[in-house]
C-alpha cells in the first residue's frame, strides 16, 4: 500500500531533549553516597581498625576432643576471656572445614542453611603428634597435615614441607561475642565473660555497636555487635580470583589503599566499573592460584561481608621481581586475605585442589553444580523494557522471521503486569496471553515474563491477600509486616527463608494459579537483593525479621531463595518433568542450582562490554556458569558499532540476551541498516551453529562443576602469561574467544596459550602455534575465535528460526588435529527439555581421531535415547590428503565416502557420511 | 484398424513420453517454473553460479554442494538456499531453506513440510479466497477513496481559489491600509507637534492654568466628540480663578482654540485605533500566506485537513492529531505519521515503540493512489 511519511517535530522537542540530556548527564554513574564505605559500616570500621599482630586467642589443648570425623577445641581470648569453640572437619575430596563459634553464645548465632547440598561427608582425622605448643593432625592423603598452634592460636595447612595456607597467622581472628546491652541494666549475664575485661575494651564498646545510622536510616541493632573476622595467608600465591559480584578485573586487586571488596546484595543504580563496591549478588568463594597449585576458600556466611587482600609483591615492578629472582629472591610472594562479616559464625571450607578442576569439583561437592538448562535457553533471547502489548510482541517476533535471525525467547518486563502485580497481565495490553503464547509456540519459540519478589499491598490482589493472611511477609523490627517502596509503590516482601512460604510461592506457578501461563512461559526474578527504593542502600533494613533471624544474618541469601522457589514452581507445574528456566539478578553460593544470572543494569559503553568478560569469568569460577550481560547495554543507547560488537561478544558468552531500558530508542537487530543487520544476523547464526557444543559444555558443567566460560589459566595452569588474562576466554577446553571490544578496532592481539598447542581460526581454518601473542587484523565482521588442535566440536550448520526447529538436524563434526594428528571430543544429545537425562535417556559419545581413524563410541553404555539426527559432514582440519575415506558401521558394512581436500589450509571435508549420530562407527582415512 | 490403433498408440506413447520428460524436472522440489531450465535431468548439474559441476543425483540429496545453494532447492541443506512454494490458488513465494521441514507450516500448500512431524493442511484456496475478498475490499475502498479524493480535490481547488481571492483582496486592503496608515502617521506627527505647541502656549500663562488646561486636554482625549461649551466652562471656571468667572466670550474663544487643537490631537487616537486594526489585519494576512505556502499536495487535496483535529483513545491515553498543526499526548519528542488510503478520514492507530516516540496511522481518502489499483490488477491471482 502506498504510504506517505511525514515526520512532525514540535518546537518543544529540542528543548526537551536538551533537558533530558542534562538530566541524564547529571545523574549518570552511581551515586556513591547511597552506598556505604567500610568506614560507614560500623563493624567493618571496627574490624579494620584491628591491625595484624599477635592474636589474643589461645587454644586450650586440654579441651580437645577428637572423634573419628571431628576435632573440637576451645579457644580463649586472653583479653576478655570469652571462649570460642573450634571445630575441624576433614571432608571427602580434600576439603578441610573450620568452624568457629562462641562456646556459649547468649543466643544462637546464625548458621547458613540450604546452601550446602547435604551434610558434607567426612573422612577420618588422626593426631600425628602433640605437645604443649600444638597438635599435628593428618589430613589423610599426600602427607597433608594441619598444625594447630596453641599460643597464639593459628592453623597451618601443610603438604610435605610447604605451607599451603595459614589461618590467623596475622592474628586477625576477631569474634565479637554477643552481649547484653549495658544501658539496659541487664548486666548480670555478662559477669562471667566480662569479669576481666579491661577498661579499654569497655571504652571501645561505643559508637555503632547498638545503633547505627546511615543517611536517614537507622539500624536498631537489638543484638549489638556480632561481627567476625579471620585472616588467611597464602604463601607462594600472587593471583587470587572470585568473590563475585564486582565490576572489576578477573585477578583481584590488593585493597590496602582503598575499601575492601564488599559482598552485600544491592540494587546499584548505574554501577561504576573497576572498583570493589558491592553489586547484586555475592558468592563468598575465593580461588588462589600459582603454577603449582590451586586452592579455594569458601566463607559460608550470608551477612554483609568485606574482603581485604594484600600482597607482598603488589607494589613491585617487573624489574623488582626480576631483581629478586636474580639475587636469589629475598622473599616468597604471598597473598594475605582477610574476611570480615557482620554476624553469624566462622564456617570456612578450605579446598585444597591441587588443580583448578579439583577445586571446582570440591566446591561442587558442597554447593552443587550448574543446573542443566533447557537447550532453548542457550539460544538467543530478545528482551526490552518493555514490549508494549501483544501486537508489539507479534511484530517483533515477525521481524525476526522477516530478517531471518534466529531467536528462542522473547521477554516481558514489569509493564506487562496489571499495575506491577506479578502473576497478572495488563487487561488491555495483554488481554489474551495464551493466544500470544500459542502464537510463539506455533513458531517453536518461548517467552519469559518477570516475577519480582516485592508484592503490591492491595487488598484486591490475590497474591498479597494470601501472603498476608498466611503471615508470610518479612516483618519489621516491631513485628508488623515490613513495607517498602518498589515498582508497584508500597510493597511487602515475602519471607523466602521459610520453606512453607517457598512451597506456597512455587504452587503459584501452577497453570491453574498463574492465569494466562503456558508451558512455554518461563520466569525472570529481578529486584531480589531485595531492592527497596526507600530502604537503606536501596535494600531492606537490617533489623527486618525473617522468621527467627534478622535480615542482617540472611541478607545475601534472599535472592537465592527467590530463585529456588521460582524454579521449584516451574518444575512442579509440569509434574516434575520439565526443566525450569529462571533468570535471577541477586545470587549467593549455590544459586547455580536454580538457573541463570545476569550482570544487572549495565550501560551502553565500551567499558561495560569489556567488563562483561571478567564478570562472567569470576562467576564461572565459583560455580555459576550460566552468566551473561545485557547485550547492547541496559542504560543509554549504543552506537551501531558497539551494538554489533556486543552481539559478537554475547554470541560467545553463556547467557545471550539483548535488553534495553524503557527510555532508550528501539534497538531490535534490524533497526540499524542492512549492513549492521547482516553482521548481527551472522553473530547470532554462529551461536546457533555451536549450540550442540554449548549444550554439551553445560552438561559437563552440570556433571562436574567446571565452568563453561573459563579463564585461560584454568586450562594452562603453569603458564603465568595466562594468569591475568581477561580480555579473552575459553568455552570449555576447545574454543578460545577474543572478542573485539575496542571502538574502531583494526586488530586485536590474542594470546594463544600452550607450548604444545595449535589453534585454528574457526572461520578460515588457518593454523597458529600456541604460546604466542597473535595480532589479528579485524573488520566489523570479525569475531576472533579459535578451535584448539586436538579437539572435535559437533555443530549444526542448518541454522533455523529457533533451536527447537533444529532438533532433528544433522551434525557436522569439526575435528581439528593437533601436532600428533590426534583429536578428541564428545557429543551429547537428549530431548533438550525434560529431566529424563537423569534416567540416562541421552546419547553421550566419545569422538576420537587418531591413527587416521575417526570413531564414535558410547561413553555411557546403559544410556538409552534415539535421535533422527545424523552426521552430514566431517571436517578434518590440519589433515593431509587421503587417498580414500571409508565408513564402517556397527553392522560391519563398509562404504567409500566422497571428500574434498583444501590444500591451502589442509582441510578434508568428508561428504555426507550419513550415519546416525547415536550409532557406533569409524571413518578411516587411507 | 490395426494400423490406425497402433499409430494412435504411438501418438499416445509420444505424449506419455513427453509428459514424463517434463515431469522429470518438475520432480525437482522447491523450484519455480522459471528455474526449471537449470534442472533438466542430465548426468550432471552445474551450480547456477557456475562454481561447481556435480552429479545430478546430488541435486536435492540433502547435502549442500553448491556455495549458492542451487543444488538443494528442495531441502534445508544449504545455509543460504531458498525454497519455492508454488501455493496453487494463492500467491507463490520463496522461503529460506531453513524453513523446510522445520516442523512449522510456511507454504500454504504444505510443500515445505514433506518430511516432518508437522501436519500441515493445504490452505492456499482459503487464503486465496480471503486474499481475493480482501483485495476486492481494498479495490472498493480504493475506488471509493479515489472518488472521495476527487471530490476533495475539487473542493480543495475551489477552496484554494477562494483563499487565493481572499488573499488578493486582503493584500489590496492591506495596501490601502498601508497608505492610510502612512497618512495617519503623518497627521499624528503633526498633531503631536500641535499638542506640544498648545501645551507650550498654555504653559506661557501661569503655572496653575496650564495644569488645569492639561487636565482638560486629558479629559478631551478621553472623549473628544462630546464636549460642550458648558463643560468647558464647568471645567475651566472653578479652577481658573476663584474671584473671576469666565465670560461667555472668553469661554468661546478658549473653546475654539481648544477644539482646533483637539481635532488635531484626535488623530493620535485614530492612529492608535488604525494601527491596531491594521496589525490584526496583517496578522491575518500573514497567517493566510503561511497557510497557503504549505504543500497541500499537487491538487491541494490535503487542504481540507488544515484546521481539523482527529482524536483516538488508546488504552488510557487520548491522542489528538491536528494535521499541519500539532499532536498532543504527553510531550511529543518525535512522531511519525503514516498515511493510508481509506474512505474515512480518521486516526486509526497510535503506537509508542520507545518512550515518547510515536507512530500514527492516519487514514484518509486523499492518501489513495491510482498506482495501487494497477498493482492489484497485476497481482498473481
Image (cartoon, rainbow, N blue to C red):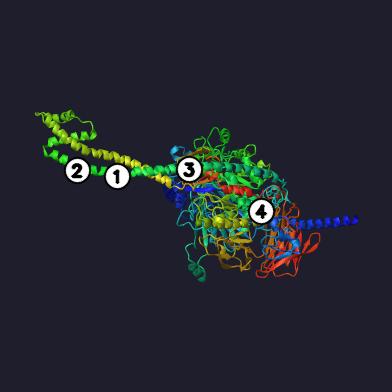
- Disc assigned to residue B94: 4
Q: Residue A409 carries which label?
A: none
The span from disc 3 to disc 4 (Cα, nearest Å) is: 45 Å
Residue B27: where, in percent of width, then height?
Answer: 75, 56
Residue B122 vs residue A552, the one in the foreground: B122
Name the residue beneath numbered marker 2: B193
Quarter in which the C terminus of chain A is drawn: bottom right
Q: Which chain is indicated by disc 2?
A: B
Q: Are marks 3 and 2 on the same chain?
A: yes
Earlier residue among tags 2 and 4: 4
What chain letter is assigned to the residue under label 3?
B
Residue B156: which numbered mark, if any?
3
| Chain letter for mark 1 | B
**Residue lying furthest bottom in this view?**
A326
Q: Pointer 1: residues within 10 angstroms few (<14), some, or many (20+)?
A: few
Do marks 3 and 4 both belong to one polypeptide chain? yes
Q: How far apart are the two marked residues, 3 and 2, measured between alpha carbons?
A: 53 Å
Label 2 Cα crowd, 10 Å radius (few <14 / some 14-19 / many 20+): some
Decide which of A587, A422 is in the foreground and name it.
A422
**Quadrant in the rendering for residue B6:** bottom right
Of circles 3 and 2, the one toward us is 3
Q: Mark 1 points at which residue?
A: B179
Mark 3 or mark 4: name the one nearer the start of the chain: 4
For discs 3 and 4, the disc positioned in front in the rendered view: 3
Amino acid at each position: 500500500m502506498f504510504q506517505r511519511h511525514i515526520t512532525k517535530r514540535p518546537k518543544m522537542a529540542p528543548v526537551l531533549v536538551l533537558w533530558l540530556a542534562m538530566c541524564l548527564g547529571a545523574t549518570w554513574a552511581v551515586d556513591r553516597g547511597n552506598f556505604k564505605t567500610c568506614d560507614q559500616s560500623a563493624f567493618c570500621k571496627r574490624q579494620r581498625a584491628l591491625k595484624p599482630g599477635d592474636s589474643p586467642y589461645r587454644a586450650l589443648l586440654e579441651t580437645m576432643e577428637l572423634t573419628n570425623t571431628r576435632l573440637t577445641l576451645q579457644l580463649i581470648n586472653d583479653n576478655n576471656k570469652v571462649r570460642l569453640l573450634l571445630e575441624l572437619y576433614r571432608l571427602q575430596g580434600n576439603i578441610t572445614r573450620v568452624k568457629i563459634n562462641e562456646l556459649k553464645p547468649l543466643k544462637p548465632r546464625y548458621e547458613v542453611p540450604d546452601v550446602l547440598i547435604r551434610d558434607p561427608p567426612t573422612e577420618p582425622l588422626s593426631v600425628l603428634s602433640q605437645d604443649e605448643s600444638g597438635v599435628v593432625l593428618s589430613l589423610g592423603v599426600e602427607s597433608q597435615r594441619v598444625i594447630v598452634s596453641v599460643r597464639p592460636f593459628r592453623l597451618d595447612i601443610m603438604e610435605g614441607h610447604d605451607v599451603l595456607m595459614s589461618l590467623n597467622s596475622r592474628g586477625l581472628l576477631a569474634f565479637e561475642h554477643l552481649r547484653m546491652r549495658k544501658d539496659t541494666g541487664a548486666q548480670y549475664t555478662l559477669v562471667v565473660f566480662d569479669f576481666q575485661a579491661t577498661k579499654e575494651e569497655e571504652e571501645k564498646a561505643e559508637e555503632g555497636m547498638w545503633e547505627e545510622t546511615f543517611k536517614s536510616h537507622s539500624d536498631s541493632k537489638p543484638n549489638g555487635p556480632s561481627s567476625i573476622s579471620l585472616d588467611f595467608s597464602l604463601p607462594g600465591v600472587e593471583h587470587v580470583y572470585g568473590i563475585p559480584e564486582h565490576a572489576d578485573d578477573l585477578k583481584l586487586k590488593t585493597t590496602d589503599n582503598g575499601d575492601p571488596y564488599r559482598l552485600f546484595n544491592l540494587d546499584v543504580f548505574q554501577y561504576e566499573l573497576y572498583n570493589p563496591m558491592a553489586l547484586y549478588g555475592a558468592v563468598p568463594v575465593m580461588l588462589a592460584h600459582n603454577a603449582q597449585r590451586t586452592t579455594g576458600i569458601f566463607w559460608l556466611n550470608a551477612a554483609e561481608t568485606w574482603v581485604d587482600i594484600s600482597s607482598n609483591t603488589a607494589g613491585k615492578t617487573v624489574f623488582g621481581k626480576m631483581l629478586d629472582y636474580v639475587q636469589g629472591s629475598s622473599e616468597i610472594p604471598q597473598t594475605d586475605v582477610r574476611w570480615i562479616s557482620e554476624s553469624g559464625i566462622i564456617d570456612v571450607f578450605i579446598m585444597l585442589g591441587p588443580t583448578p578442576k579439583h577445586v571446582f569439583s570440591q566446591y561442587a561437592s558442597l554447593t552443587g553444580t550448574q543446573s542443566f538448562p533447557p537447550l532453548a535457553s542457550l539460544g538467543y533471547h530478545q528482551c526490552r523494557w518493555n514490549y508494549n502489548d501483544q501486537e508489539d510482541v507479534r511484530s517483533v517476533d515477525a521481524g525476526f522471521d522477516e530478517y531471518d535471525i534466529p531467536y528462542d525467547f522473547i521477554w516481558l518486563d514489569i509493564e506487562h503486569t496489571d499495575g506491577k502485580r506479578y502473576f497478572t497481565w495488563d487487561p488491555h495490553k495483554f488481554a489474551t496471553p495464551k493466544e500470544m503464547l500459542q502464537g510463539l509456540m506455533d513458531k517453536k519459540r518461548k517467552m519469559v515474563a518477570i516475577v519480582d519478589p516485592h508484592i503490591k499491598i492491595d487488598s484486591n490482589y490475590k497474591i498479597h491477600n494470601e501472603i498476608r493472611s498466611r503471615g508470610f511477609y518479612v516483618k519489621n523490627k516491631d513485628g508488623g509486616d515490613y513495607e517498602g517502596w518498589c515498582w508497584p509503590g508500597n510493597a511487602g516482601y515475602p519471607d523466602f527463608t521459610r520453606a512453607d512460604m517457598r512451597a506456597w510461592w512455587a504452587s503459584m506457578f501452577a497453570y491453574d494459579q498463574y492465569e494466562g501461563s503456558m508451558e512455554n512461559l518461563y520466569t525472570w526474578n529481578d529486584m531480589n537483593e531485595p531492592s527497596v527504593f526507600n530502604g537503606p542502600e536501596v535494600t531492606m533494613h537490617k533489623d527486618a525479621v525473617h522468621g527467627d533471624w534478622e535480615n542482617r544474618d540472611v541478607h545475601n541469601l534472599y535472592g537465592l531463595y527467590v530463585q529456588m522457589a521460582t524454579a521449584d514452581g516451574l518444575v512442579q507445574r509440569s509434574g516434575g518433568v520439565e526443566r525450569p528456566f529462571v533468570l535471577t539478578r541477586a545470587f549467593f553460593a549455590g544459586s547455580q542450582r536454580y538457573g541463570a544470572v545476569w550482570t544487572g543494569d549495565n550501560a551502553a559503553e565500551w567499558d561495560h562490554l569489556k567488563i562483561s568478560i571478567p564478570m562472567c569469568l569470576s562467576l564461572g569460577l565459583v560455580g555459576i556458569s550460566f552468566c551473561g550481560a545485557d547485550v547492547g547495554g541496559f542504560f543509554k543507547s549504543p552506537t551501531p558499532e558497539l551494538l554489533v560488537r556486543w552481539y559478537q561478544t554475547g554470541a560467545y558468552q553463556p547467557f545471550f540476551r539483548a535488553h534495553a531500558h524503557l527510555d532508550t530508542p528501539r534497538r531490535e537487530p534490524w533497526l540499524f541498516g542492512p549492513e549492521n543487520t547482516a553482521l548481527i544476523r551472522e553473530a547470532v547464526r554462529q551461536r546457533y551453529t555451536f549450540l550442540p557444543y554449548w549444550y554439551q559444555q553445560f552438561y559437563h558443567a552440570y556433571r562436574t562443576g567446571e565452568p563453561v566460560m573459563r579463564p585461560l589459566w584454568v586450562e594452562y595452569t603453569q603458564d603465568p602469561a595466562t594468569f591475568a588474562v581477561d580480555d579473552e576466554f575459553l568455552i570449555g577446553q576447545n574454543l578460545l574467544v577474543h572478542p573485539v571490544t575496542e571502538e574502531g578496532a583494526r586488530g586485536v592481539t590474542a594470546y594463544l596459550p600452550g607450548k604444545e598447542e595449535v589453534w585454528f581460526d574457526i572461520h578460515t581454518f588457518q593454523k597458529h602455534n600456541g604460546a604466542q601473542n597473535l595480532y589479528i587484523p579485524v573488520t566489523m565482521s570479525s569475531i576472533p575465535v579459535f578451535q584448539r588442535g586436538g579437539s572435535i566440536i559437533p555443530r549444526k550448520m542448518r541454522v533455523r528460526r529457533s533451536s527447537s526447529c533444529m532438533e532433528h538436524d544433522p551434525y557436522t563434526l569439526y575435528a581439528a588435529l593437533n601436532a600428533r594428528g590426534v583429536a578428541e571430543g564428545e557429543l551429547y544429545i537428549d530431548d533438550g527439555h525434560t529431566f529424563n537425562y537423569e534416567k540416562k535417556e541421552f546419547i553421550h559419545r566419545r569422538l576420537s581421531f587418531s591413527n587416521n581413524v575417526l570413531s564414535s563410541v558410547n561413553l555411557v553404555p546403559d544410556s538409552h535415547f534415539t535421535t533422527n539426527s545424523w552426521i552430514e559432514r566431517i571436517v578434518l582440519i590440519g589433515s593431509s590428503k587421503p587417498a580414500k575415506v571409508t565408513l564402517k558401521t556397527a553392522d560391519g558394512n563398509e562404504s567409500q565416502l566422497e571428500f574434498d581436500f583444501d590444500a591451502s589450509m589442509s582441510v578434508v571435508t568428508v561428504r555426507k557420511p550419513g550415519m546416525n549420530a547415536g550409532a557406533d562407527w569409524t571413518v578411516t582415512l587411507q | 484398424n490395426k494400423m490406425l490403433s497402433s499409430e494412435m498408440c504411438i501418438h499416445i506413447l509420444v505424449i506419455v513420453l513427453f509428459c514424463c520428460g517434463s515431469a522429470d524436472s518438475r520432480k525437482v522440489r522447491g523450484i519455480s517454473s522459471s528455474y526449471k531450465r537449470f534442472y533438466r535431468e542430465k548426468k550432471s548439474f552445474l551450480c547456477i553460479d557456475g562454481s561447481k559441476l556435480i552429479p545430478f543425483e546430488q541435486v536435492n540429496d540433502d547435502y549442500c554442494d553448491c556455495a549458492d545453494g542451487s543444488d538443494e532447492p528442495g531441502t534445508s541443506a544449504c545455509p543460504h538456499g531458498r525454497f519455492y512454494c508454488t501455493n496453487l490458488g494463492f500467491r507463490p513465494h520463496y522461503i529460506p531453506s531453513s524453513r523446510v521441514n522445520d516442523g512449522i507450516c510456511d507454504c500454504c500448500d504444505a510443500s515445505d513440510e514433506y518430511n516432518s512431524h508437522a501436519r500441515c493442511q493445504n490452505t492456499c484456496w482459503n487464503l486465496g479466497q480471503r486474499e481475493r475478498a480482501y483485495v476486492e475490499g481494498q479495490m472498493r475502498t480504493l475506488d471509493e477513496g479515489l472518488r472521495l479524493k476527487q471530490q476533495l480535490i475539487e473542493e480543495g481547488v475551489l477552496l484554494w481559489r477562494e483563499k487565493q481571492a481572499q488573499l488578493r483582496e486582503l493584500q489590496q486592503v492591506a495596501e490601502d491600509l498601508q497608505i492610510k496608515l502612512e497618512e495617519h502617521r503623518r497627521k499624528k506627527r503633526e498633531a503631536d507637534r500641535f499638542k506640544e505647541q498648545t501645551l507650550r502656549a498654555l504653559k506661557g500663562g501661569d503655572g496653575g492654568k496650564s495644569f488645569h488646561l492639561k487636565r482638560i486636554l486629558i479629559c478631551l482625549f478621553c472623549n473628544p466628540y462630546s464636549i460642550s461649551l458648558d463643560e468647558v466652562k464647568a471645567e475651566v471656571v472653578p479652577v481658573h480663578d476663584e474671584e473671576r468667572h469666565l465670560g461667555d466670550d472668553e469661554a468661546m474663544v478658549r473653546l475654539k482654540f481648544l477644539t482646533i487643537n483637539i481635532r488635531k490631537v484626535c488623530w493620535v487616537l485614530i492612529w492608535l485605533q488604525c494601527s491596531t486594526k491594521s496589525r490584526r489585519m496583517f496578522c491575518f494576512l500573514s497567517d493566510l500566506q503561511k497557510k497557503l505556502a504549505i504543500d497541500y499536495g499537487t491538487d491541494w487535496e490535503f487542504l481540507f485537513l488544515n484546521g481539523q483535529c482527529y482524536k483516538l483513545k488508546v488504552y488510557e491515553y487520548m491522542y489528538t492529531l491536528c494535521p499541519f498543526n500539532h499532536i498532543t499526548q504527553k510531550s511529543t519528542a518525535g512522531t511519525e505519521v503514516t498515511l493510508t488510503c481509506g474512505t474515512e478520514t480518521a486516526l486509526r492507530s497510535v503506537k509508542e515503540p520507545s518512550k515518547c516516540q510515536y507512530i500514527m496511522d492516519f487514514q484518509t481518502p486523499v492518501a489513495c493512489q491510482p498506482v495501487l489499483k494497477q498493482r492489484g490488477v497485476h497481482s498473481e491471482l
